[in-house]
Amino acid sequence: MLDLTFNYCLSFPGVTAEEKWDEEMCFSVGEKLFCSMRVDPPYKLSFKCTREQFHSLIARPGIVPMPYLARYHWVQIKRPDTLEWSELQAYIQQAYDLIVNMLPPEERDAILKARV
């Protein structure tokens, strides 16, 4: 599932990937992080979500507040198989959209034009 996640994150317009923080692959758009995943065991995946989703997600087994970023509504999935692939795709898409919508208008418009 990690290969799928890696390729899925890179499929969005304007996304860059960079390894940071002790073998953590970070996916950003407009230099702002929207998803990260540990590339070596133990595999973990983190992403930004809405406030409402944050509370419902961390109530599920295997999902916890992401250390250092929980106050910004980030969750960490402890095992890749915690969520079905289609559900994970939807959360990653939303994380990307949340960050794109926070970008300055000119930057956001350029990224959205690339999407078409």
Image (cartoon, rainbow, N blue to C red):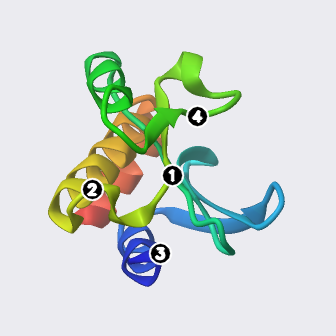
Q: Nearer the viewer, mark 3 or mark 2?
A: 2
At label 4, which amino acid type do we have? Met
Callout 4 environment at 10 Å: few (<14), some (14 to 19), or many (20+)?
some
Of residue 35 and residue 76, the one placed in the foreground of this image is 76
What residue would you read off at disc 1?
Answer: 78
Q: CA distance from mark 2 to mark 4?
A: 16 Å
Q: Position of residue 115 (x, y in %)?
A: 26, 64
Crowd class of label 2 (few under 14; some 14 to 19; many from 20; radius 10 Å):
some
Q: How would you rate the neighbour count of disc 1 (Cα within 10 Å): few for under 14, some for 14-19, many for 20 or more? A: some
Which secondary structure, mark 2?
loop
Q: Residue at x 38, y 48 (%)?
A: 96
**C-alpha separation, residue under disc 4 versus residue under disc 1:** 10 Å
Task: Specify the quadrant of the image occupied by residue 26.
Answer: bottom right
In terms of sequence position, does the residue under pointer 3 or pointer 4 come before the other? 3
Identify whether 46 is placed above or below 12. above
Residue type at numbered disc 1? Lys
Quick one: label 1 or label 3, which is nearer the N terminus?
Answer: 3
